Image: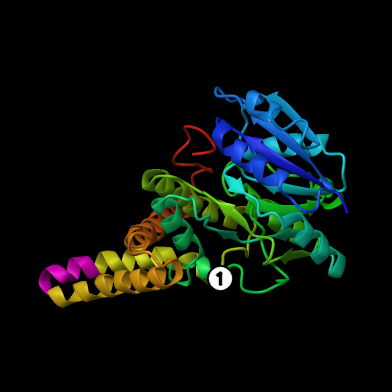
Amino acid sequence: MFFSIIIPLYNRPDEVDELLASLCEQTDKRFEVVIVEDGSTRKSDAVVTKYRDKLDLTYFEKPNSGPGLTRNAGAARAKYDYLIFFDSDCIIPPGYIGTVSQALREEYADAYGGPDAAHPTFTTIQKAINYSMTSFFTTGGIRGSKRSLEKFNPRSFNFGVSKKAFDRIGGYGSMRFGEDIDLSLRLLSNGFRTALIPGAFVYHKRRSTFGQFFKQVYNSGIARINLHLAHPGSLKTVHLLPAFFVTGMTLTLILSVIHPPFLLIPLSYSLLVFIDSLIKNGSSGVALYSIAAAWIQLTGYGTGFLSALWKRLILKKGEFKAFEKNFYD
């Protein structure tokens, strides 16, 4: 099986350099790479030139429209029947393509997703954010635990889909945040099978500052309400947990003014996160930063969710996104 790897790119020449270098190390070479420059002011053409003799590589530019529609543009140029989408801030382990190829031969899926991990070279903040996004204590632990999930929703940073299924549903929609979940839900509603391939992991940098991370998860909270309206029935109990966390911890902090022992609740949660991260990462520094990352993830997502719930479900306003400077921050 041959694959078309599609990478949307916006002002990330350093990141795509690392990504392309990792693709050169793949043990299975049956793939092409399609890079789509989405109206960048810091272009990656010089970086791409370094790899033209090492990879089957296509590179082109287009006006800025966001990652979803940019992925569609890349898919239109793909020459193989199975598409793989990576974000530019990923590093791909050498056995990735071989792992995916074997998994699809053993049990074919119209679409698949894979987990993410922290590379040893990542910064302390990036490792802490990775912990938060994959931890059981933040809702991240619901991902990556089983080989195949009937209604698994792949995410676009590490996502494969047959070109037939992708074209059948019209690719990514116009939704500017949560577009990957929207695509997954449309695949499922049209009868296509999705699967999780645990061995097909990537090293995902995510965001490099807590400010960027907050914007990301806040918009994710908003997107969950937008997705609920676009796909009735897609909102699950687990999606409500960050909102419960925000309201519960806010009430706890207020009550602690009257009765200080209530502070033991947020302190106990923080200690739990610290111990768990310390065990998994073997670093007290990462564990300390993990406390901040966990609180930012849950409060950011929870407040974004509650804001969208109020504006969209109560006030009946149209779709919105809080942070719109560009589609990639």
Q: Is residue 204 left or right of residue 22?
A: left
Q: Quadrant of residue 252?
A: bottom left
Q: Nearer the viewer, residue 309 or 1?
A: 1
Residue 126: image location, x then y, percent: 45, 52
Residue 38: image location, x then y, percent: 63, 29
Q: Residue at x 63, y 55 (%)?
A: 155
Q: Residue at x 86, y 49 (%)?
A: 2
Which residue is under mark 1? 142
Query: Mark 1 belongs to which amino acid?
Result: Ile
The quadrant of the image that shows the N terminus is bottom right
Tell me: residue 242, above or below residue 272: above
* Residue 305 in sight in this render: no
Query: So how many labels did they put on this image?
Result: 1
Magenta stretch holds residue 15: no
Residue 295: image location, x then y, percent: 35, 60
Residue furthest toward the left? 258
Prevailing secondary structure class for the magenta stretch in the rendered image:
helix
Q: Secondary structure at mark 1?
A: helix
Give the magenta range. Answer: 252-259
Q: Residue at x 51, y 64 (%)?
A: 134
Q: Nearer the viewer, residue 72 or 320?
A: 72
Magenta stretch holds residue 258: yes
